[in-house]
């Protein structure tokens, strides 16, 4: 995995974790911000042909 892909995967993971924490504390503004960040990262991944379906679906449903 090259540096771009690694960074993208780490940012998605961090955003999903932040989304989970924001939901846990009921911070709806942060939930919305993190959801937007995740959408942006997914779009970037799609544009560059990066497969992000390797485990994020499970994390997203857990959040």
Image (cartoon, helix red, strand yellow):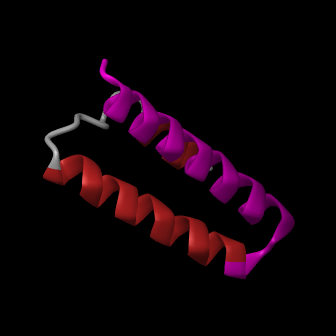
> Which residue is at the front of the view, 32 or 59?
32
Residue 23 drawn in magenta: yes
Report whether 2 appears left or right of 11. left
Name the residue at 33% across, 32% down.
5
- Position of residue 45 relative to residue 55, above or below, is below
Q: What range of the chain is rendered magenta?
A: 1-29
Residue 58 sits above or below residue 25 on the image: above
Residue 34 picture quarter: bottom right
The extreme front residue here reads 3
Measured from the top left, where is residue 45 in percent x and y?
Answer: 26, 47
Does residue 1 sit above or below 34 in this rendering?
Answer: above
Q: Residue furthest right?
A: 25
Question: What residue lies at 31% left-to-right and 18% top-to-bottom?
Answer: 1
| Magenta span main SS | helix
Identify the residue at the far top of this view. Answer: 1
Residue 23 position, x and y percent, is 73, 64
- Quadrant in the picture for residue 55: top left
- Compared to residue 8, the image places residue 34 above or below, namely below
34 sits to left or right of 7: right
Numbered circles on residues, count: 0
| Image location of residue 50, percent across then percent down | 22, 37
Which residue lies at the image location 30% right of the left edge and 36% below the top edge?
A: 53
- Say whether residue 8 is magenta: yes
- In the picture, measured across the screen, residue 14 lies left or right of residue 49, that is right
- Picture coordinates of residue 26 (x, y %)? 81, 72
């Amino acid at each position: 995995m090259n540096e771009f892909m690694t960074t993208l995967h780490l940012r998605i993971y961090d955003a999903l974790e932040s989304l989970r924490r924001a939901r846990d504390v009921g911070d709806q503004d942060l939930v919305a911000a993190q959801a937007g960040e995740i959408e942006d990262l997914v779009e970037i991944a799609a544009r560059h042909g990066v497969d992000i379906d390797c485990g994020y679906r499970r994390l997203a449903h857990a959040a």
